Amino acid sequence: MIETVRNPLPMLPVAPLHTASNRERAGPVARRAFTENSLLAALPRKDRQRLLAGFEPVTLTFGEVLYESGQPIRHVYFPIDCLISLLTTVEGHGALEVGLVGYEGMIGVPLALGIDVSAVDAVVQGSGAGMRMKSASFRRELRQNRPLQRALHGYAHALMVQITQAAACNRFHAVEARLARWLLMTRDRLGTNHFHLTQELLGNMLGVLRVAVTNAAGALQRRKLISYSRGDINILDGNGLEAASCRCYQIVKNVQDHAYGGHAIHEN
Ligand SMILES: [Zn+2]
């Protein structure tokens, strides 16, 4: 069992993986590309340094539940090289992934809107480093830090686009194109072409049964875009995978790439 898992939810995709051997296999296997969170990196140095002083460095572990739907938000999290899934559950169905958050964003967007209860589950999908701050401290900081407010608004918009696009994508686009998209999104957030995603997780990402995941992964493999074995994924041809993905990937990426204006966010 994983000692650090808090309040594991029976519906979560990671539930069947809570064994030592699976846990070892579950995290990304080749990485450490990112050393800082890009939302924080976009802040002017003075504001960033003051903010950083109030953070607590944390190591987030695969399967760890950061938020539960309907429960109070106790901390905000800024991932560095970990990957967090935002999941929603519908009675009688498994979890569905509605958002993916890594070094480019943060967990706790509702606080920026004055809401202190989470509407989704937030679960660690790839172990790694991050920083966190108590919600009350973060709210205080937010009130007096205009550049942070703007960065958060930029990220809240980018996340809204990601979630909105996922709704359309799940309804209209083929599983193979959607799988290509989620693999690219995972790659971008982990900074590596080689990572581990089980079929259960992929099924939750795509909202389909495992057999559909197997078929779609097999098709991408036959096109020599990825190799896929027991959840170990290697992206062999990133450009080819982008071509195989639906346009949703690029739409969401463009918004995220410009979320912080491409430069430090200045007070005026
Ligand atoms: Zn799509």
Image (cartoon, rainbow, N blue to C red):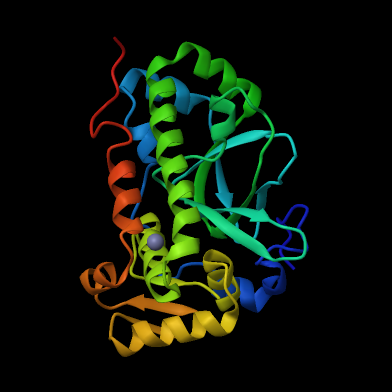
Residue positioned 65% across, 53% down in the render = 88
Q: Nearer the viewer, residue 52 or 63?
A: 63
Return the residue found at the far bottom: 222
Percent coordinates x, y for residue 256 in the rendering: 34, 43
Residue 131 against residue 237 in the figure, above or below: above
Image quadrant of ligand 1? bottom left
Query: Which corner quadrant of the image does residue 24 belong to?
Result: bottom right
Taking depth in this image into account, of 97 and 43 the one nearest to the observer is 97
Left or right of 106 in this view: 117? right
List x then y, in percent, for residue 45: 31, 23
Residue at the spot 77% in from the left edge and 59% down from the top edge: 91
Residue 46 vs residue 266, the one in the foreground: 266
Quadrant of the snapshot with the N terminus: bottom right
- Image point 38% across, 19% down: which residue? 47
Of 196 and 257, the residue lying toward us: 257
> Is residue 200 placed above or below 12 in the rendered structure?
below
In the rendered image, is residue 19 in sight? no
x and y, in percent, of residue 124 in the image: 58, 56
Image spot of residue 97 (x, y percent)? 56, 58
Rendered-image quadrant of the C terminus: top left
Q: Along the horizontal axis of the image, is 98 left or right of 187?
A: right
Q: Relative to 221, does residue 26 appear above or below in the rendering?
A: above
- On the question of residue 76 being in view, the answer is yes
Which of the 4 image quadrants contains residue 19?
A: bottom right
